[in-house]
Image (cartoon, rainbow, N blue to C red):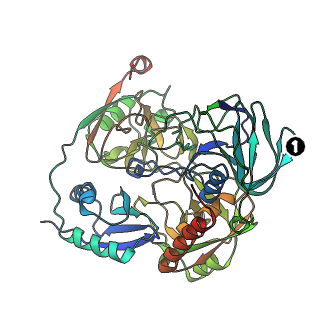
Amino acid sequence: MSIKVLKPGLQTSIQDLGRSGFRHLGVSQAGAIDSYHLKLANWLVSKPLDSACIESYLIGPVIEFQSNMTIAITGAEFEMYLNNTPISNNRSYNVHSSDRLEFGKLISGARAYIAFSAALNCQTVMTCYSSDTTSGIAATQTPTLSVGEIISTLDSIDELPIRTLPKELVIPNQKNIIVRVIKGLEYSRLTKKSKQILFESTFKVDANSNRMGLRLNGEHLELKEQHEMVSSPIVHGTIQLPKSGQPIIALNEGQTIGGYPRVAQVISADLHLLGQAAPNSKISFYPITIDKAATLQKHKTDFLKEHITYF
Amino acid sequence: MLFHNFSIHINSDCSLLVQFEEKPNLKLTEFIHSFIASIPQLNLKSYTESVAAYQSILLIFDPLNWNYQESIKQLEQCLSKFEPSKFFEPKIIKIPVCYDSRVAKDLTAFCEVKNISIKELIALHTKPSYRVEMLGFLPGFLYLFGLNEKISLPRKSVPDVKIPAGSVAIGGTQTGIYPIDSPGGWHIIGRTPISLFTPKQKPPAIANPLDFIQFEAISYDEYLNYVD
């Protein structure tokens, strides 16, 4: 009862919704960058929504199932084959021992989530299964899956009824991603022109982005005067401005403390959208109020509850 | 009672930042950690965790149904009447360090720039008891206070791509130990054979805020044969 990694792909790792309560030790939450699609993948295989999935980034893996289980893939769209037959996102498939799932070319988005009905058979580390690929904290042998690695699982029900994602829940992957933000603590230090650039121009995602952060390239952002920051806390979604004038958005493996001005903050309801930002895709920021951010978070949670029946 | 002027800011749609006005100092550090330790008893609604920094405290809440106005009010009240208790019993933690260019690639260059011998550097670096101000940046990274300014040196302009775990380094007016392999811009002057962060251990980090760190010089042979 296991899943064997034949080819690991680029940055393939086990992720659930991540850990909380360890930031005071310098440990950030890790977890699925696109938590929305992790939840949907789990729903398709009738698992609790916060279960661990395989997250793959830009280049997907080739894996072999060594027992019967049900699987589903969501998020980034890849060319995919199950025993050489093309398959698609957003529905479940019953697979059998020695079936092989192969990822091909990336079509849209950046991160795919592979859910499997069988439960993981390993110990959690610091309360969850998420791999922190930056610091190496991992429940599996290595933080990113390696060639020949065996992911041990428990027994699964042989066949589950096939589930398809309700179309209301499908979010098409965009080349231009708009995320809503609130102003950051050092926003007022930006020049008038930079404030305008921040909210009115688009930024291109740099190839050096990873699970720590999205590095952006765009029109140069400037502070009114140079400002030496005392090291201060950073959270998921904080948009920092290093001296280069090119912003960085902290993701799930971002530092807990940093030293750059915090110019804006992505709202909780939109954080998952950052998970589908591939290199060279575009991001723009739309400012809203804190009250609006709270309402949007509630809407998103209610919307998900409404459309997926959970038992 | 010593009052610390503060202001509370909305940091995100699920976090608040308490910012203190005064420059970082021991009394403030004690106040910050004492307050954080008392948070579980305050019954702050939707509260999940907090992070201490030199001059600020970050409090994180569950974004769903979080009433930030209520949290700000609650926090303001608690902070203005809070009296830090003297419950800290700081430990003194000794960390063996091998100051040898075979494990510390910047040691020779560092001593040349500072115009001191390796022996003098070791004496200056091992003399103080460094106070742990906070943990953060990387898992188990300790922000230490107390570096002798004679051995401070601005960070490298081009950071190294990979600094090995255990490297003891100086960056600006700070000294620290890289707990894991990591990129970094500090000057590597030594290496410790002990591990600073073990995820499966409880607690995973070797020190808590307000503990003291003392570096002890060991030889290259002792480094190689060290059993953690």
Quadrant of the rendering where the C terminus of chain A is positioned: bottom right
Query: What is the crowding at mark 1: few (fewer than 14 residues within 10 Å), some, or many (at least 20)?
Result: few
Q: Give the image quarter of residue A283.
A: bottom right
Residue A110 appears in view: yes
User: Compared to A224, does B108 lie above or below?
Assistant: above
- The one of A161 and A99 positioned closer to us in this rendering: A161
Residue identified by numbered label 1: A85
User: Compared to B149, does B107 lie above or below?
Assistant: above
Q: Give the image quarter of residue A144.
A: top right
Q: Chain of mark 1?
A: A
B146 left or right, relative to A144: left
User: Compared to B106, does A167 lie above or below?
Assistant: below
User: Compared to A168, does B134 lie above or below?
Assistant: above
B106 left or right, relative to B195: right
B74 left or right, relative to A256: left
- The one of A271 and A94 positioned closer to us in this rendering: A94
Q: Residue furthest left?
A: B1
Residue B77, position as x, y percentages in the image: 23, 73
**Residue at figure coordinates x 14%, y 52% from the top left:** B86
Quadrant of the rendering where the N terminus of chain A is positioned: top right
- The one of A271 and B9 positioned closer to us in this rendering: A271
Label total for image = 1
- The one of A192 and A257 positioned closer to us in this rendering: A257
Residue B32 appears in view: no
Residue B57, position as x, y percentages in the image: 34, 62
Residue A14, position as x, y percentages in the image: 60, 42
Q: Residue furthest right?
A: A85
Residue A243, position as x, y percentages in the image: 56, 63
Callout 1: helix, strand or loop? strand
Name the amino acid type tagged 1: Thr
